[in-house]
Amino acid sequence: MGDPRPEDHPDPGLIEGLEPDQLVATSSRPLPPRQLSAAAKIGFWTLRGFVLLITALVVYSFVVSLRGH
């Protein structure tokens, strides 16, 4: 079985020998975007739609309650 770490991921033995500022510089590199399956993408878009719907309902309820109805 191959090494599960990305090619540019440093060896754990090297990490232990780094100075604090070097450790921060090494660990602050952004990760590449995660590849999601089609089902996960659909799930996240559905969740976004749900959040927008709930937000609209909360804003509507707030506005109606301000009007005193």
Image (cartoon, helix red, strand yellow):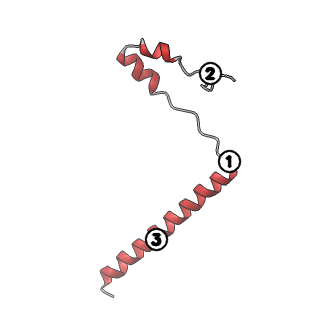
- Coordinates of residue 47 in the picture (x, y in percent): 55, 60
Element type at mark 2? loop
| Above or below 68: residue 50 | above
Left or right relative to 12: residue 32: right
Amino acid type, mark 2: Glu
Return the mark for residue 17: none
**Alpha carbon of mark 3 to alpha carbon of mark 1: how far?**
29 Å
| Above or below 49: residue 12 | above
Return the mark for residue 56: 3
In this figure, which residue is indicated by the disc labeled 1? 37
Instruction: Tell me where residue 35 sits by quadrant.
Output: top right
**Alpha carbon of mark 3 to alpha carbon of mark 2: how far?**
45 Å
Amino acid type, mark 3: Ala
Which residue is at a point 47% across and 69% down the rendered structure image?
A: 54
Q: Crowding near pointer 2: few (<14 within 10 Å), some, many (20+)?
A: few
- Coordinates of residue 48 in the picture (x, y in percent): 54, 60
| Above or below 29: residue 55 | below
Left or right relative to 56: residue 39: right
In this figure, which residue is indicated by the disc labeled 2? 7
Which residue is at a point 41% across and 76% down the rendered structure image?
A: 60
Element type at mark 3? helix
